[in-house]
Image (cartoon, grey):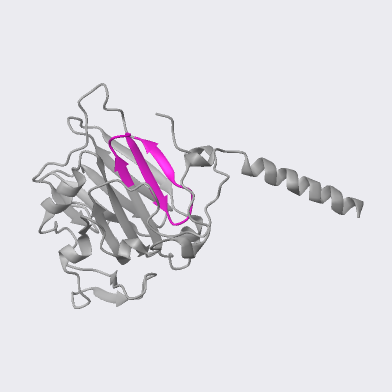
Amino acid sequence: MKYFGIMLLVLVCCCFVGTHAINTLENEIAHSDAKSHPNPKLPASEMPLEVDILKLLNVSHKDQGVSFVEGPIKKFPAYKFRFSPYGHVPLAKSNIVSEAMNNSRGFTVVFLYRQVRNNLGTLLSLHSPGRLTPWFQLTSNSRTGILTVKYRLRKSNKLIQIDWELPKHYRKSPLAAWLWLSLSMDFQEDLIRLDLDCVPSSFESIPSRKFNSHSFAVPRDSLVYFKEEPGRKNRFLGSIQVAKVLPYVTHERLWNCLEISRNLIPEFQKPLL
């Protein structure tokens, strides 16, 4: 009985320390009750001013190398890409995507995808004609478990690269699990926000523009590539249910999570600018 009392006291102390270890205002905490969320599958609905890449391409299961699959969002189409004519081919209406990403306040890209194992795939890539160095590029590597974003600021030749670890349940699955992804580039706060499934949000600083003329801007004649990049072999293989660009910054998760950890280790906390 005495032993049980000691263990109970230790457990209570540990819980107290854990819940007070961080300032929860540093990270968005999702609703604890799934029913309280107004729309737990928002990316599937039509969001204001959205650019839906799958609709823009008019993707169909009738296309060569494309088939219907069942995705996490019921009654919403999802497509499996084995091989297709979309590789190395820029979107026909690339200017719609680049204009959405040229919003002075910032933009958000949203994906819901399931990648095959051992695949290094490009989800979205924007390039000036004849240039291999991208203005913006988002790649997913299911072999190393790394998600990478690369971008360039205007009037700068420096390519900035940021790597994040994909959730462990995604990396270890025999057939990679579906992954919710939302990445916002906020040019008012010079901040990148990444949300992956229900792990704590990640934040990275964008080099400050307060003392220089650098800013993110995609040239109007840029080419936009979906699932691949020009001159490379980083073709995405797997299934995609959501692929959208929003001409604004989102400040909360676009899907519902029952629980998000409150014990945030330093790399998950919002940086001080």
Q: Quadrant of the C terminus?
A: top left
Q: Nearer the viewer, residue 19 or 39?
A: 39
In the picture, measured across the screen, residue 229 lies left or right of residue 251, that is: left
Q: Position of residue 121 (x, y in %)?
A: 31, 57
Residue 233 can be seen, yes or no = no
Quadrant that contains the N terminus: bottom right
Q: Is residue 194 visible?
A: yes
Q: Is 198 included in the stretch rendered in magenta?
A: yes
Residue 20, image x and y in percent?
62, 40
Q: How many marks?
A: 0
Viewer-proximal residue among 134 and 217: 217
Quadrant assignment, res 89 = bottom left
Question: Is 133 one of the magenta-colored residues?
Answer: no
Figure check: 210 above or below 268: above
Provide residue 159's location: percent of width, then percent of height: 26, 36
Residue at far top of view: 211
Query: Is 28 left or right of 182, judged from the image as shown?
Result: right
Span shown in magenta? 184-205
Residue 241, picture quadrant = bottom left
**Nearer-the-camera pick, 93 or 186:** 186
* 124 relative position to 95: left or right: right
Q: Residue furthest bottom?
A: 62
Q: Give me the residue at 31% from left, 55% from top.
A: 110
Look at 10% across and 57% down and name the residue there: 93
Q: Is residue 53 above or below residue 74?
A: above
Residue at the image position 43 percent from the left and 30 percent from the top: 272
Which residue corresponds to the image point at 30% horizontal and 46% vertical from the top-left?
A: 249
Residue in the foreground of this view, choosing between 3 and 68: 3
